[in-house]
Image (spheres, rainbow, N blue to C red):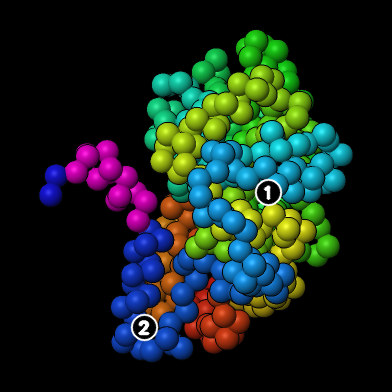
Amino acid sequence: MAISKKIETFLSSASWIRKMFEEGERLRKIYGADQVYDFTLGNPNVEPPAAFKEALKKLALEPVPGMHRYMSNAGYVETRTAVAEALAEQTDLPFNANHIVMTCGAGGALNVVLKTLLDQGDEVIILSPFFVEYKFYIDNHGGVIKEVPTTPEFKLDLGAIGAAISPRTKGIIINSPNNPTGVVYDAASLEGLGKLIAIKEKELGRPVYVISDEPYAKIVYDGGSVPSVFNWIKNSIVVTSHSKDLALPGERIGYIAYSPKIEGPELLLEGLIFCNRTLGFVNAPALMQRVVAGLQYESVDIAEYQGKRDILYNNLTALGFKMVKPQGSFYLFPASPLPDDVEFVKAAQKHNILLVPGSGFGTPGYFRISYCIDKKVILNSLPAFKTLALELGLTP
């Protein structure tokens, strides 16, 4: 079958996670599920909070007349209002329903934002390591990708970002807590980014948008929190979903929120609504919009994820693996003990440990561990990690 040469190329460059997942299926058939340690997918294994189940049951037993019909392409006003009220409380900014567009998850939200903002050839900066789909989303809408590295601790490198901004730069995508590193960008970093962007906007005579991808914003450890870009950056847009905080990835429910201080808010809202419709997403799912409206302060049990992080971080660092301790999300991003991260992943595979090479996230020399899996799998994997560490000559 003949398909687009571009898509054929993209398939080969975007297949690491899928390849490792398929390898896991093969190994489970051979060795049994309890002998395969699959750390590849960021697919939450926890159940949604009790409040979600109660809200869903109530809606099923007491249906709202017409609740399955079309609605405004921005989403239900009551849901957008609930989101806006939560953001207003968090940021002390005057959010209202007109600052919110409900979307089919964060992926849908990102595509809507990029379609709305980009002209052919506009540049979008992404920070490595990055979620691999960013490159394809930008390409979807005629954008040009500019990869900028973070610091060795995976923090914002403001000097590198400033050097990368050009007359064609339309926006920057940031992701905090980060996939794959688990790093949270602190308030000082966001303040610095805001000042840098303001200087560049003055030079260019137009906005440079900071698009903050935040599906992990409530999954933060050790009593920490995620500072809001809205408090530090004027032309900021948040895209997010309830896939992680409410463990609803299959429901595809998320939203776009843009700052009350943003330039040209009326035209931006019109553009977002138009693109939400014409990209084919049309609306976020009606049922889920109604369910999540009252759940803006709910989340899954973060302590469960923190416990899994601690088991892996403490045991792997004791074996000699080097990594930045994650502050959030549910990933670890250790340095590869071998210069070639792909070769390391292959070596781990021989012990039925399935990982994703850092090359898949734009940062060779590392590998990603996703620990949103059963705790028993993590515990069972530790002897295999020990054997692997000894085989590679690691020392604490």
Neighbor class of circle 1 (other Cα within 10 Å; few <14, some 14-19, many 20+) is many
| Residue nearest the viewer, comparing 336 with 77 | 77
Check the image and report above or below for 353 versus 148.
Answer: below
Q: Name the residue at 54% across, 87% down.
A: 380
Q: How many labels does the image show?
A: 2
Q: Position of residue 321 (x, y in %)?
A: 59, 68
| Residue nearest the viewer, comparing 29 with 82 | 82
Amino acid type, residue under disc 2 in the picture: Arg
Q: Give the range drawn in magenta.
A: 3-15
Check the image and report above or below for 109 versus 49.
Answer: above
Helix, strand or loop at label 2? It is helix
Give residue 343's quadrant in the image. Answer: bottom left
| Residue nearest the viewer, comparing 25 with 37 | 25
- Where does label 1 land, which residue? 79
- Where does label 2 land, which residue? 28
Helix, strand or loop at label 1? It is helix
Amino acid type, residue under disc 1 in the picture: Thr
Say whether disc 1 or disc 2 marks the residue closer to the N-terminus. 2
Q: Residue furthest left?
A: 1
Residue 4 is one of the magenta-drawn residues: yes
Q: Position of residue 300 (x, y in %)?
A: 69, 69
